[in-house]
Image (tube, rainbow, N blue to C red):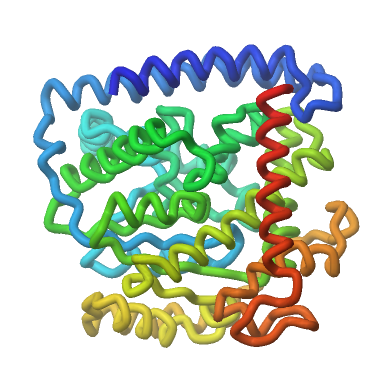
Amino acid sequence: MLHLFLTSTTRFIGMAVGALFRSPDGTSRISARRVWVMLGFFPLFALVQGLHWLGFLLDDLFFRGYRQVEIRAPLFVLGVPRSGTTNLHAVLARDPQFTTFATWECLFAPSVSQRLFWRAVGRLDARIGGPLRGLMTLAERRIFTALDDVHAMSLDTPEEDYFALMPVLSCFILALPFPNSAHLWRMGSFDRDMPAAERRRLLRFYADALRRHLYVHGPDKRLLSKNAAFASLANGLAETFPDARFLICLRDPTETVPSQLSSIRSGLAFFGVPPDSPLIRERFIAQLAFYYDNLLRLANGPAAERTVTAALPDLKRDLAGTVHDAYARLGLPLDDAFATVLEQAAAPARAYRSGHRYGLAELGLDADALARRFAGAYRHPVLCRAAPEGGVAGTAPAGAEANVEGARDAAGAAAMATEAG
């Protein structure tokens, strides 16, 4: 833990200096907006990080029992971004056999100490009429409403627990304010590019985050984790949690790539990073190519018997049937009450239409070029029917291996450019 604290502190200083004095994409100038936003962001972020580490210290002093908690047969919902993982996670979180992270726990209470503190504050607030709760609800509406078309969230809803890696500066969302960080891009290709020693430390840190959660919510519960960003860690997770189950969500890459690039544009712009930067676009595309490749290796590797893959169209068309099938194949119990929940959730899933709008041209993309670049993705059986012309169901389309290798080369070049920049 001490090693991770020192490493993350040193890394934060380097990221802060880089953000103020280095071009965000290696070509554009540093804007005045970026400087001012960062000068406001750094103190607040450092304060939150400091509170997290204080919480971890208090855990090791007063709540050391979390270390003995066993993580039994967790269920990881992985996938590529924009593939239906959020809705699936929200539905699965209603199954009483599971416990999963809420947004407030991810962002403000990764430690046992912080959770117990905020729970006590919540009880006190309720006794005096809930004024703090009212203020938080108002703040939620102002902060989260703008995200509804891209990723609806609130403080109490289930959320991706990759935020648990924020204290060690390994949460990939930090690539938006810090696109120069080589470490963050290695997180985006974790199973391939993260040095072995750091890989082990980060996986241990994440496992401890899950133990802390179970310590608070009940060690008898089964942990439910949903992270599209953990596609890069998929095989590391399978090694760390040998009895884990995996439910993978996929989407045609010609739809995934533009949706993902569009969803991050506002975040990049907020931090003064050019949202149309060709270099940053290429880094994200290369990362997504690795996601598909890494998830395929998970589904075809030693964890194949405890892995189920579903496509977004199947989740929309027949959510209940898809989940029923996944539970049966993964050996998960499904009680009558949750079966009713699934049936009730199926109709809204079929009717859902995203308000997120974008065009390929405005993102600098071409549909045919994307299909060629991601040809290897169609080796996933659930995507075979969406393969471009020239592909054969059940096999990779012509040139798939070359495209996968090309994506790897591009990712490596981007990482080297980041290190050199």
Vertical placement of residue 242 versus 375, above or below: above
Q: Position of residue 89 (x, y in %)?
A: 42, 63
Q: Is residue 61 above or below residue 145?
A: above
Q: Is residue 248 above or below residue 229?
A: below
Viewer-nearest residue: 168 or 203? 203
The answer to whether any part of residue 128 appears in the image is no
Task: Determine which quarter of the picture holds residue 166.
Answer: top left
Task: Describe residue 376's horizontal placement relative to residue 213 as left or right.
Answer: right
Quadrant placement of the C terminus: top right
Q: Position of residue 321 (x, y in %)?
A: 42, 87
Residue 248 visible in this rendered orientation of the protein: yes
* Left or right of residue 310, residue 68 in this image: left
Q: Residue at the far right: name it.
A: 361
For the point 52% across and 58% down, the residue is 294
Residue drawn where x is 60% and y is 74% of the image: 379
Foreground residue among 345 and 195? 195
